[in-house]
Image (spheres, rainbow, N blue to C red):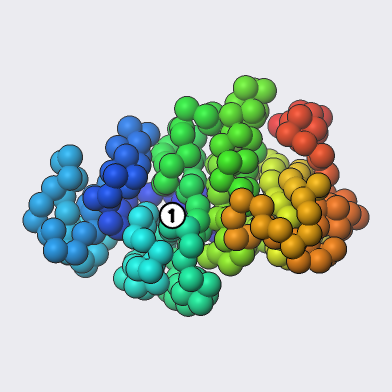
Amino acid sequence: MMIPFLASFPRRVAVFNPTGRYAAAQVAAMREAGTRLVGGIALGRGGEALDGLPLFDDVRALPEPADAAVIYTPPEGVLDAVRAAAGIPSIVVAAEYVPVHDTLLAARAARAAGSWMVGPNTLGLCVPGEGLLGSIAPAFCTPGRVAVLCRSGTLTLTMARLLTAAGIGQRAVMHIGGDSICGRNPHDYLAALAEDPATDAILYCGEIGGDKEYALAEAVRGCAKPLVAMLVGRHAPAETRMGHAGALVGGERESAAAKLAVLAEIGAHVARDPAAAIAILKDLGS
């Protein structure tokens, strides 16, 4: 399956719950980046406007069908919001601390409806030169042919800035989400990027915790494009959460060392730090 926002960047974006302080700031940032917002979904405020953005009580009241939804609903409302947005090709869920069971149901609902769900607990994505869904600063990014995929929000921003400073442009900068369960996993992205004609190489920035990198390693077998993999948390103590819910080493299998070994064995280009990742990408001609 092609990633919808890469096949064609959304031109009709709806924002769920745009009236909070954080959400309102991101609405302004997305507009500044050139993202076309068609309306905000805010129950009970239909008919009003937020800095010129028309508000509606329900997604079905939008003047034209949305091709992307950015959801700033608090954690306890995420499941209902995703169910309401299901069927919209791209869905970005910003909230952290979404109950795990709700995330499972939301991810299932999105997939069943053919939606590509990014998050929860995500900064979203930026396609340089085209637009922004979420809160990745477009000024950190520059157009190019390296797809950047990260589990950590901080690392997403850091790598975008470092790549741009090194003269390496990005096809897209994507934060899959920091929770243990998210709408789409790294191997889903890799399978799609393998078929993307605008992507020459993939930079994956992972971390400790969970088993997402093992599924990613299996997907490398079917990808003809180079994957550069960097994992942070090599020195993290076991059974201590580092930063967010997804970064927790529950056993040796979930450590950075074990995951890097598997990725290296399968043919990925393994980098110990951002400088090494950039050097490898330059050697690959990116």
Left or right of 187 in this view: 284: right
Q: Amino acid at mark 1?
A: Ala
Instruction: For the C terminus, give its image quadrant.
Output: top right
Question: Residue most toward the left?
Answer: 47
Element type at marker 1? loop
Residue 19 at x, y = what percent? 24, 50
- Callout 1: few (<14), some (14-19), or many (20+) C-alpha neighbours within 10 Å? many
In this rendering, the answer to whether 164 lies above or below 221 is above
Q: Residue at x 17, y 54 (%)?
A: 55
Residue 11 at x, y = what percent? 33, 47
Q: Residue at x 51, y 77 (%)?
A: 101
The total of numbered circles placed on residues is 1
In this rendering, the answer to whether 43 lies above or below 143 is below
Left or right of 28 in this view: 213: right
Q: Quadrant of residue 170?
A: top right
Residue 103 at x, y = what percent? 49, 71
Left or right of 11 in this view: 96: right
In this rendering, the answer to whether 224 lies above or below 200 is below
Q: Is residue 142 visible?
A: yes
Instruction: For the N terminus, give its image quadrant.
Output: bottom right
Q: Residue at x 48, y 39 (%)?
A: 136
Q: Is residue 27 visible?
A: no
Depth check: give the residue in front, 137 or 59: 137
Residue 272 at x, y = what percent? 82, 39
Q: Quadrant of residue 214?
A: bottom right
Residue picked out by circle 1: 94
Q: Residue at x 71, y 52 (%)?
A: 207
